[in-house]
Amino acid sequence: MAGPRSRVLVVDDDPSLAEMLGIVLRAEGLEPAFVADGGRAVSAFREVRPDLVLLDLMLPGADGMQICREIRQESLVPIIMLTAKADTVDVVRGLEAGADDYVVKPFKPIELVARIRAQMRRTDTDHP
C-alpha cells in the first residue's frame, strides 16, 4: 500500500483540477508534484522520480500518448491516463501506449484514489 511519502506526478494543464487533485492526494498521505506543460513532463518525471503518474492526453507542448511512451521506455512506474477523451479507440490507444489504467473526466475522487492505491499495491507486490 502507498506509504506516506509516495510521490504522484500529476501532468495536467487544468489548474482547478490540479488544485483538487492536490487536496485529495495530500489527504490520502500522498505527495503530489505538478507539471502543466507536456513538453516538461518527461524531465519532471526524471526529477521527481514518482511512484505513480497521472497523465492527461491533451496537453500544451507534447501529446500525452507520446509522454506515456517515453516514460514507459525508461520505467515501469504505474501510469494512469486521466482525460476527457472517452471514446473506446482513445482508451485502447492509451493502454497500448503503456498506460496501466484509463480514467475519464469527470471522475469521482474516491474512485481515482482507489485506482491509485490498486496500482501502488500491484507495484509493491511486484517489488517486495
Image (spheres, rainbow, N blue to C red):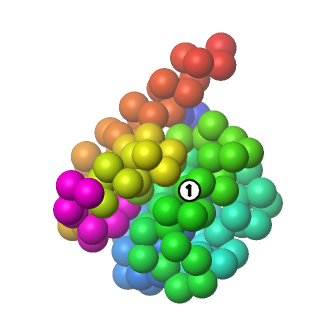
Q: Residue furthest right?
A: 47
The quarter of the rendered structure image containing the C terminus is top right
Asked if residue 107 is among those painted magenta in the image, a careful observer would answer no
Q: Nearer the viewer, residue 32 or 46?
A: 46
Snapshot quadrant of residue 104: bottom left
Q: What residue lies at 50% left-to-right and 62% top-to-bottom?
A: 65
Report the residue marked by disc 1.
Answer: 68
From this viewpoint, is residue 118 visible? yes
From this viewpoint, is residue 19 visible? no
Q: Amino acid at mark 1?
A: Cys
Taking 51 as reference, is 84 above or below it?
A: below
Q: Which residues are magenta?
A: 82-89
Q: Nearer the viewer, residue 26 or 57?
A: 57
Pinpoint residue 126: horizontal percent, then vertical percent: 59, 18
Pinpoint residue 33: horizontal percent, then vertical percent: 61, 64
Asked if residue 85 is among those painted magenta in the image, a careful observer would answer yes
Q: What residue lies at 59% left-to-right and 63% top-to-bottom?
A: 67
